[in-house]
Image (spheres, rainbow, N blue to C red):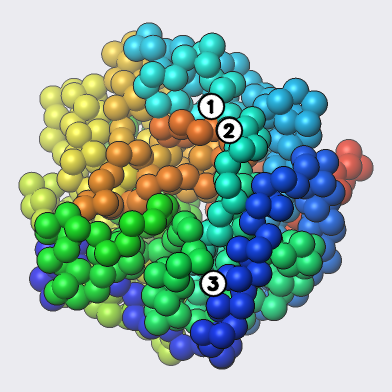
Amino acid sequence: MTIAAQQGSPQFPQAASAVAASDQTTMDSAIAELQAQKDAWVATSVPERIALIDRMISDVAAIAPRWVDACLRAKEIAPGTPGVGEEWSTGPYLMLKQLRQFRTALDDIRTRGVPRIPGPIKTRPDGQVTAQVFPQTTYDKLFFGGLTAEVWMEPGVTRADLPQTQAVVYANKNHPGKVALVLGAGNVSSIGPLDALYKLFVEDQVVLFKTNPVNAYLGPLILEAFHTLIDQNVLRAVYGGASEGAYLCTHPGIDEIHITGSDKTFDAIVWGPGAEGAARKATGQPLLNKRITGELGNVSPVIVVPGPWSASDLAYQAEHIASMLTNNAGFNCNATRVIVQHEGWGQREALLAGVRKVLGGVPTRAAYYPGASDRYAAFKEAHPEARQFGAASGSQLPWMLIEGVTPDQQDDIVFTTEAFCGLFAETALPAASVPEYIERAVAFANDNIWGSLNVTLLVHPKSLSDPAIAAAVEQAVANLRFGTVAVNYWAGVGFALGMTTWGAFPGHPLSDIRSGTGVVHNALMFDRPQKAVMRGPWRAMPVPPWFVTRGRAGREVFRRLAYFEASPSAGKAPGIALAALRG
């Protein structure tokens, strides 16, 4: 397969599943039950929805340990390793936090018509409106010290009409009900359920949720945690792979579709598979005319801005960058894939040496996601000079870093193809000054790296004391065409905040869908968002518990945070803070 043919996110091989696929009779029955209830769901009052969420919070908390244990077994994660904290953080914690955020939003809708925006609303010099959405609570300030986030609206939205772009489905209940098909992701346990919640509580649609074969083992637990929605006949779950998905997508009882996965799968749904699908795409004749949204992956860049970094700065940011890759064994669409540096920065090699040191100390992980070995081999074949850390053993693959990739080689696999395994690359751009480098790095990320999901910039505070560099960074934040832009904090954390939007930068046509279309999470229910912008401290204190070097802290902090979100209490905060400090 040529590099051009691989471009984009992977075409994942069919995963084996221990859970039997649902037959067509079962799927037909589930759709019929949802169709019968879709208008009743639209008519369900806000207080009734709040009561449903209250029950779900209790039910998710009750099954949380079993949820995590199931993921640990499936992903071959050993007790006491950083992966334990990852599963608490990306499973029960995220689910409980999002449920609580939706509950708060619904309570605001009940009392004041729209969700309350917790921070300032501003209008940029170019007229674009921004709303600070995080931190939402005092506890957010405590647990995410120094991290803030905004949602930037599409051009044309004014400060005066911003409230009219929130919770639109709640302002006018004359719309008909719909049945949405949610095609679940297999890598992160909360993605599919979170997508289902978004359809239900933000878009007012009942949901048929098809589990992904990779993590279909979670199906019974999800049904248990969400039994209140099942009892209301507004949620059903079915099992199966590509053939069952194809049947459901074309089913007349499915009104809309949401997918988290590959652009290849998205294209197969919209245009059809194989040569016939390619011909339809070439002539602009989609096979499917239903509304479809999707989050479809990314070759995620990290732009390193040169500055006066100390030895401890280099060590911290090396851990930061390595953690962006190693989280979930590299099976994340928001994982670092390309480190962009200034060719002439004197500390370029020192930063790479730090990254190599961290990777050398991180145990290898099971490559549990289908096709990982083949994708890894393709990158290794294209770049035999790549450095590897650890040894292949059984299901485990070494970490891989491909240094010094020529930026002029625009069709290089590292720029065009999402690896979706434990590897990333580094490239360097020439520039006569730091502001010029920043401008070139933005253009390179926008135009030469595939996708538009998320991008991270790392810039030292002393660099920002230079007005020219500070202005270049602010212009970079504005000009980067990514759904989430983060300064000094991994943009992938935007997936976890819940208050921000998560999805591609808007505007991709169906014929070139890239990272997708539409957003999820978005607890304040903005109808016309453009992107999320996060800003973090240069060096967070304590070190964030999701850093790969913070295994003990991650396990304890995220377990405690999950139960905090289930039942917030000031008495629980000291224990969380102490666990974070223990490391």
The answer to whether the residue labelled 3 contacts the one labelled 2, judged by CB atoms less than 8 Å apart, is no
- What residue does disc 1 label? 165
Categorize mark 3 by other alpha carbons within 10 Å: few (<14), some (14-19), many (20+): many
- What residue does disc 2 label? 168
Give the Cα separation between the discs numbered 1 and 3: 30 Å
Q: Is residue 474 above or below residue 2?
A: above
The image quadrant that residue 7 belongs to is bottom left
Nearest the viewer among 327 and 480 is 480
Q: Is residue 44 above or below residue 152?
A: below
Q: Is residue 39 above or below residue 12?
A: above
What x and y, as percent, mark residue 545?
63, 51
If you read the primary sequence from the N terminus, does the residue marked by circle 1 or circle 3 appear first? 1
Q: Is residue 77 above or below residue 265?
A: below
Nearest the viewer among 81 and 502 is 502
Residue at (60% x, 16% y) in the render: 120
Mark 2: secondary structure: helix
Mark 1 residue type: Thr
The image quadrant that residue 441 belongs to is top left
Nearest the viewer among 400 and 117 is 117
The answer to whether the residue labelled 2 contacts the one labelled 1, judged by CB atoms less than 8 Å apart, is yes
What x and y, as percent, mark residue 193?
61, 61
Mark 3: secondary structure: strand
Question: What label sits on residue 210 in the rendered view?
Answer: 3
What x and y, as percent, mark residue 191?
55, 60
If you read the primary sequence from the N terminus, does the residue marked by circle 3 or circle 2 appear first? 2
Residue at (39% x, 75% y) in the render: 246
